[in-house]
Image (spheres, helix red, strand yellow):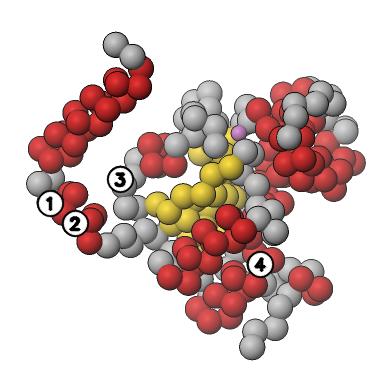
Amino acid sequence: MKFIEQLLLQNKAWVEQKNREDKDFFNRLSNVQTPKFLWIGCSDSRVPANDITGTDPGEIFVHRNIANMVVHSDMNMLSVLDYAVNVLEVRHVIVCGHYGCGGVRAAMGNQQFGLIDNWLRHLKDTYDLHHDELDQIVDATQKENRFTELNVIEQVFHVTKTSIIQNAWAKRNLPYVHGWVYDIKNGLIKDLKVTMNDNTEMPRFYRLRTK
Ligand code: CO
């Protein structure tokens, strides 16, 4: 059996199982989606937002890219964020990185991988911001893990600097913006405790006055 056919068979089995558990499941979801969360995560196949948080379709609005980056000129990310915040009115935005991230590891090295090197440049710039701390860590895994955490924190800041988030905060002090790291070795999520829902801690020049 070809692997691709296996996927379609598994889809049928999944539908049957969902219908057995909850007859109204697809009917309910087909009418409306009201997720409370926006997930900005890595494309890595080992970090699927719904599975690792024990949630169902309909519960998390998802944006994923290599190394869970928030690049302020990325129209894809901005569109997802704007729709999630202003139309779906999610209560939480979660930036979730993960230990063992290939993008993070590649950004720490000097090897060329092609086009992606231009995407990884954003990570290298984050490394540069924190090189005083990172260069002091001798153990390679510890260094990589800390860089992963610092990168998540930096991407949380990038979310909060957008006009989308600052306008929403001015109106309703929502959404909360969180930074998490997932450990692919044991499946556990660590909260980096950088949650924000106002711009009072933000450097002055990033603060935007609302109209
Ligand atoms: Co990754």
State the residue position of label 4.
162
Pick whichever of labels 3 and 1 is earlier in the sequence. Answer: 1
Q: Secondary structure at mark 2?
A: helix
- Residue 77 position in % (x across, y down): 58, 55
Q: Which mark is residue 24?
A: 1
Residue positioned 19% across, 36% down in the render: 15
Rounded to the nearest angstrom, the CA distance separating label 1 from label 2 is 6 Å
Rounded to the nearest angstrom, the CA distance separating label 3 from label 1 is 14 Å
Q: Amino acid at mark 2?
A: Arg
Q: Secondary structure at mark 3?
A: loop
- Residue 3 position in % (x across, y down): 35, 17
Give the left or right position of residue 72, taking residue 96 as reference: right
Tag 4 near tag 3, CB within 8 Å: no
Give the left or right position of residue 179, taking residue 49 as reference: right
State the residue position of label 2.
28
Q: Nearer the viewer, residue 45 or 144?
A: 45
- Residue 142 position in % (x across, y down): 73, 28
Closest to the camera, between mark 3 and mark 1, is 1
State the residue position of label 3.
56
Q: Secondary structure at mark 4?
A: loop
Vertical placement of residue 9 versus 66, above or below = above
Residue positioned 31% across, 60% down in the render: 33
Q: Amino acid at mark 4?
A: Thr
Tag 3 near tag 1, CB within 8 Å: no
| Quarter in which the N terminus is drawn | top left
Q: Amino acid at mark 1?
A: Asp
Tag 1 near tag 2, CB within 8 Å: yes
Q: Quadrant of residue 105?
A: top right
Pick whichever of labels 4 and 1 is earlier in the sequence. Answer: 1
Give the left or right position of residue 129, taking residue 20 as reference: right
Q: Secondary structure at mark 1?
A: loop
